[in-house]
Image (cartoon, rainbow, N blue to C red):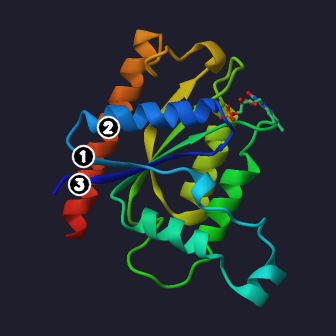
Amino acid sequence: RAPRIVVFAGSIRTGSFSASLAALAAKELALMECEPVLLSLADYPMPIYDGDLEAAQGVPAAAKQLRDQLAQADGVFIATPEYNAGLPPLLKNAIDWASRVQGGEGDAFKGPVYAIGSSSPGGLGGYRASMMLRQTLALGLGCLVLAEQVMVAGAAGAFAESGDLKDARAQERLRAVMSTLIEQAALRAGLRA
Ligand code: FNR
């Protein structure tokens, strides 16, 4: 079977640049040998994590659903924005809640291979947020995270009407990262079969 690759952005803002990056990644993946699944965190609403809330009500259903999506994936691509040189709370909160889900089939974090993308209207392309996401995934959750990543600087003017990146080299970079992600996801899928 073709590797299943889950893709989502760490922003639900209308016109979000990271959502544009996630959509483009899904579009590129669809042209390759895999099954891309584009998700929106808007469909997984969760309160801000609080231990008292968890003790009283357990983990929200949306966190369990997101965790299941990740556990069923062979590969995951996350496109993060950068807030104050770090991760936006929407994304960190979703990961934190998903990490609290007990049981269920598969392993949401040690199962799939992860790849990171970031974007920013600024010049650094969300580099610092990408490093924080890498830290949370790799050091916090034991995920296998690809070394290869894609960063889109000057995001406000980076995307063409078609959704592609105007800069051919950046577009090529995205393609290369997606291709490596599929390759590694297929390997992991084969190993787990
Ligand atoms: C930002 N932004 C921002 N950008 C950046 O490159 N480095 C940063 O440290 C920050 N800090 C920051 C903090 C907060 C609270 C906000 C709301 C925004 C700007 C940010 O990159 C911009 O709003 C993007 O458009 C957000 O990503 P989406 O929603 O377009 O995906």
Q: Quadrant of residue 100?
A: bottom right
Sequence-earlier tag: 1 or 3:
1
Q: Are marks 3 and 2 in contact (CB under 8 Å)?
A: no
> Of the residues tagged 3 and 2, which is closer to the observer?
2
Q: Is residue 8 visible?
A: yes
The alpha-carbon separation of the residues under discs 2 and 1 comes to: 7 Å
Q: Residues within 10 Å of mark 2 (few under 14, many from 20)?
A: many
Seen at 47% across and 17% down, the residue is 165
Q: Is residue 110 visible?
A: no
Residue 187's tag is 3
At which x and y percent is residue 177?
Answer: 38, 33
Q: Is residue 163 above or below residue 141?
A: above
Name the residue carrying label 1. 34
- Label 3 sits on a secondary structure element that is helix
Q: Amino acid at mark 2?
A: Leu
The answer to which of 44 and 141 lies nearer the viewer is: 44
The answer to which of 127 and 60 lies nearer the viewer is: 60
Name the residue carrying label 2. 29
Where on the image, by quarter, is ligand 1? Answer: top right
The alpha-carbon separation of the residues under discs 3 and 2 comes to: 16 Å
Q: Residues within 10 Å of mark 1 (few under 14, many from 20)?
A: many
At which x and y percent is residue 156?
Answer: 65, 17
Q: Residue furthest left?
A: 1
The answer to whether mark 3 is within 8 Å of ligand 1 is no
At which x and y percent is residue 168?
Answer: 40, 11
Q: Is residue 9 above or below residue 192?
A: above
Q: Quadrant of residue 104?
A: bottom left
Q: Amino acid at mark 3?
A: Leu
At which x and y percent is residue 173?
Answer: 40, 23
Q: Are marks 2 and 1 in contact (CB under 8 Å)?
A: yes
Q: Amino acid at mark 1?
A: Cys
